Image: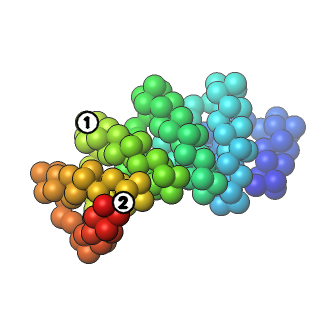
Amino acid sequence: WVEAAGLLVEMASFGLELDTITYNAAASACKSDGAWAQTLGLLDDMALSCIESNTITYTSAANACEKAGKWAQVLGILAVMAASQVEVGAYVYNAALRVCSAAGEWAKAVRLLAEMAATRVELDVFVCNTAVSACEKGSEWAKALGLLWEMPSATVEANAITYNAAVSACEKV
């Protein structure tokens, strides 16, 4: 990410225009290197320079924050995307679900799953498994079973991972 940031500075010094594509490439480099704070800094720089962020920009930032375990920042990115009317896809939601699950924030994971359904983001077995696993980690067996039983109504077929997480949740009763 250091090299990418240096190239942005060099481009600006040569009078070359920095645009969304340039910033997306830099954000992707930060994501790969786990530089979550720098990725958020790029988002701030874009806003200050009136350069539009897009789904790719926010996804890179969310993934960088997820890798660092920064669940609050990932949720903040989701809020900014919604406020900016940038499409929030399943990939960003799944990053948010994974980081909330890892942090023991099962209620936030369940809320995110409900938000996905409410905003008509297609649910898949991966996001549902992550939410069920979050409930399992939080010893919320009833909620885990509820999510498992709701999956067919969302036309999502549970798999062995889903059932294993639900069974593990029940073991913690």
Q: Which residue lies furthest to the left in this view?
A: 153
Rate crowding at label 2 as few (under 14), some (14 to 19) or many (20 or more) other CA atoms within 10 Å: many
Point out residue 113 in the picture as x, y percentages from the top left corner.
32, 45
Name the amino acid type tagged 2. Answer: Glu
- Residue 23 vertical position relative to residue 141 in the rendered view, above or below: above
- Residue 8 vertical position relative to residue 76 in the rendered view, above or below: below
Q: Nearer the viewer, mark 1 or mark 2?
A: 2
Point out residue 70 in the picture as x, y percentages from the top left corner.
60, 47
Q: Give the residue displayed 34% in from the left and 45% down from the top.
A: 110
Name the amino acid type tagged 1. Answer: Ala
Point out residue 69 in the picture as x, y percentages from the top left corner.
60, 53
Disc 2: which residue: 136
Q: Quarter-wise, where is residue 12 in the image?
A: top right
Point out residue 15 in the picture as x, y percentages from the top left corner.
82, 35
Q: Residue furthest front?
A: 173
User: Looking at the rendering, in which quadrant would you find the C terminus?
Assistant: bottom left
Q: Give the residue displayed 24% in from the left and 53% down from the top.
A: 142
Which label sits on residue 80? none
